[in-house]
Amino acid sequence: MPAEPNPPPTAAGDSALQESQLPLVTVITPSYNQAQYLEETIRSVLSQDYPRLEYFIVDGGRSDGSQEIIRKYADRLAWWVSEKDRGQADAINKGFARATGDIVAWLNSDDLYRPGAIASAVTELMNHPECGMVFGDVVSIDSNSQPFNIMTFGDWGLEDLLQFRIIGQPAVFVRRSVLEKAGYLDLSYNLVLDVELWMRVAQQAPIRHAPQLWASARFHPTAKNVSLAAHYGAEAERLLAWIAGQPALQEIYLRRKRQIQAGMHCYSARYLLDGGLPGPALRAYLRCFWTYPPAAFPEINRILYAAASLVASKMPRSRGLLNRIERRRARFLEQRKSRIQALLAGENQRDQD
């Protein structure tokens, strides 16, 4: 169970730090054609209880009503712009280049910060000065902001990231000094741009997981992780080739080659299955199993579902079995959703008290 957020940063002992002593945090929101979610995102940032915040919004210039929403909050923004860009990575990099905060993060225009997230992240970085990046856990929400899952991660380091153990981007905070050494986002990536950046950051300094709910990631039909799910595998394969070709990563790659390759296949399989392609997903899972079987074991339920979906598509008589599996899965997901909503409602009530 994720822990409750930490209190705001404190100095050695019990005395609270003066506001001027707290590190400045820069948050960047890249925005493009998501006006229906943008205002909730902005409010989740501006309602944080952390006093030293520099907030940028970089809008792609789409005529979808986003500019009108941004103007409502312009007096509380450090900077914003609405102009054509070369995609999400370019928009975020514009913010990185302008940032003056000691700590930087980006929050996409359909995601949310949970209350106290920034203060908790700052606490972690202040308490662990050796770390260059911290990341928390993430609540999955739907188009109506209703939670349906909690994504928890582990205390992973560089070797784990290279094995495609993915962390929740909305809950990541990085020291700007470390980001400058690692370099900004690579514009050649559209889907795994954050995964590749975390690998470079982790080469510069240790990273740390905080078992706290810091953000909500929205899943909806037009989100990239839904609408482009079937395309993640191709970029993951290119990222694997990048890992194999990096001189600084050669020792790890040669020592963990099977785990890294299997992790890439498993990562690709998850997105292929989510993209409605059970056949390619099952083949990717099989490649994962043959490369390094332990990497496939945690995915057994998804592997069975992919196999049942594929059989049902080839053999209409077996469709009834798949329907039963889908109904059981739907009941499980609904029960899980109810438990998560009750848990979060309890946390929100404690925050109000």
Image (cartoon, grey):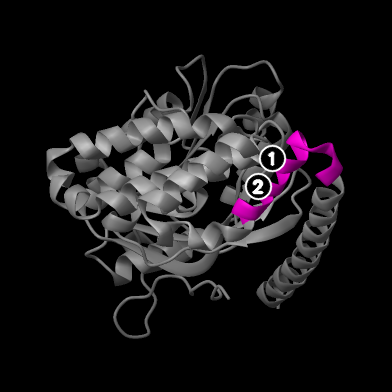
Disc ID at residue 252: none
Extreme residue in the bottom direction: 13
Residue 146: name its quadrant: bottom right
Name the secondary structure under disc 1: helix
Residue at the disc numbered 2: 307
Amino acid on which the number 2 mark rests in the picture: Ala
| Residue 105, image x, y percentages | 42, 46
Question: Which quadrant holds the C terminus?
Answer: bottom right
Residue at the disc numbered 1: 310
Q: Magenta segment: does it hold 26?
A: no
| Residue 134, image x, y percentages | 37, 59
Q: Which residue corresponds to the image point at 75% horizontal and 35% vertical from the top-left?
A: 313
Badge 2: how crowded within 10 Å, few (<14), some, or many (20+)? some
**From what the image shows, is residue 14 above or below residue 172?**
below
Q: Which residue corresponds to the image point at 42% horizontal and 30% vertical from the top-left?
A: 235
Q: Which residue corresponds to the image point at 19% horizontal and 34% vertical from the top-left?
A: 245
Q: Give the range drawn in magenta.
A: 302-318
Q: Which residue corresponds to the image point at 68% horizontal and 30% vertical from the top-left?
A: 222
Q: Does residue 156 appear to the left or right of 43 in the view shown? A: left
Whether residue 92 is visible to the viewer of this picture, yes or no, is: no
Q: Does residue 237 appear to the left or right of 218 in the view shown? A: left
**From what the image shows, is residue 99 above or below residue 177?**
above
Name the secondary structure under disc 2: helix
Whether residue 134 is visible to the viewer of this picture, yes or no, is: yes
**Overall secondary structure of the magenta stretch?**
helix
